[in-house]
Image: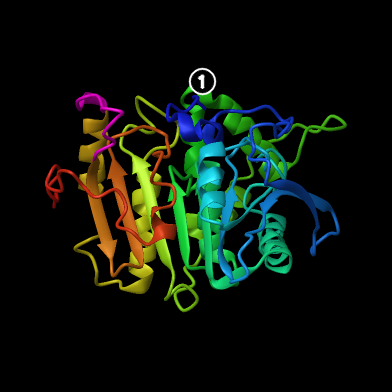
Amino acid sequence: MKRFLIVALACVFAAVSAAAYDGNDWPEQSKVVKIKSSADGEIQLARFYAAKSKAPRPLVVRLHAWSAHYDVPERPLFEQLIKEDVNFISPDFRGPNERPEAMCSDLVLSDINDAIDYAIAHGNVDENEIHIIGGSGGGTATLFCYMKLQRKIKTFTAWSSITDILDYYYACKGRPQYDRYCHMIDQATSGVERDGFTPYLDKQEAMRRSPILMDVPVELRKDSKLFLFHGIHDGGTSGDVPFTHTLRFFNKVVAAFDVTAKDIMFTDTEMLRWMEWQIVGEPFVREEQEVLVKRNYKDKVIVCLINAGHTMVAGHELDAFHGIDPLMPRNPNFFSKID
């Protein structure tokens, strides 16, 4: 996975080694904590900050990227949360997606829930103000939580997310520079190499772990907001995750709430047209990160297709948390709807 070009959040999406960061780039007010798994008793590490206010404060749950650990620092983001005196926790949830315990497993879901419980027990958390955010593989985990986490969450924000793991596998297989993600999926779906065992793609397991193939918990999420962001160049000239993953997930969730809301769902024709533009369109201006398409279903599901690659735009990570209109389009008519 290419190193991301937005400096403030480069570490979220960079391809990292299996070794955890030493934490030196974290704000000194945060600390590493140990959380005993309620599922299997294993100790899971997390980076945590407890708000200082006597009044209950929000909680932001940051979910790490595909190849990363909990301790990849995002100093600007967490300094902003500390400045606003907001609780935050960055759980490990079984680390990189390279073994069966990771990658949208039942243990991952349990670990994230345990991390939220830990923050509530050790911080002064307003339980009506819990927000989950993540990019790339962290976006995948965020959408997994949207589908499966059995607790009320106010907002979910997912950037550049893999939503269909089987499709992602084949997208990577066709591009040698991303082949190592195929190997990780092999290990996560079938098992790691040991005693002569060779990992292989278990298609059924990859599908079982794909957020887009899960049922939408409409009743549980009726008061939540889901924010989806993806760069149009991702999967083409700048990144490994095709932006269609996010657009199809938007369609899936909107249809679950209202199958008749076809006027805002993305058609195959639209997606094919934008895939053409992805290659021949003008290069994106990194300073602008212009919104090309924005659609909104009753403030429950908001999607933005942006003029960028595989990235999270600095300064907009907390839009949903702050309750502001994310990435207001500079040119909302850039793409007209294609029937």
What residue is drawn where x is 58% and y is 28%?
15
Residue 185 placed where, x, y %? 62, 38
In the rendered image, the vertical position of residue 250 relative to residue 167, given as above or below = below
**Dominant secondary structure (helix, strand or loop) of the stretch shown in magenta:** loop
Q: Is residue 144 left or right of residue 114?
A: left
Query: Residue 189: which quarter of the image?
Result: top right
What residue is drawn where x is 68% and y is 47%?
30
Q: Is residue 322 magenta?
A: no
In the rendered image, the vertical position of residue 238 relative to residue 252, given as above or below = above
What residue is drawn where x is 36% and y is 73%?
257
Q: Residue lying farthest bottom?
A: 219
Viewer-side residue, 38 vs 337: 38
Query: Mark 1 highlights which residue?
Result: 176
What residue is drawn where x is 35% and y is 63%?
301
Q: Which residues are magenta?
A: 279-290
Other-residue count near label 1 (Cα within 10 Å), few / some / many at <14 / 14–19 / ≥20: few
Viewer-side residue, 23 vs 147: 23
Q: Is residue 291 left or right of residue 148?
A: left
Residue 54 placed where, x, y %? 63, 69
| Residue 143 in view here | yes
Q: Is residue 239 left or right of residue 265?
A: right
- Amino acid at pointer 1: Pro
Element type at mark 1: helix
Q: Is residue 25 left or right of residue 196?
A: left
Residue 121 placed where, x, y %? 73, 68
Query: Residue 130: which quarter of the image?
Result: bottom right
Q: Is residue 289 magenta?
A: yes
Residue 292 placed where, x, y %? 22, 42
| Residue 101 in view here | no
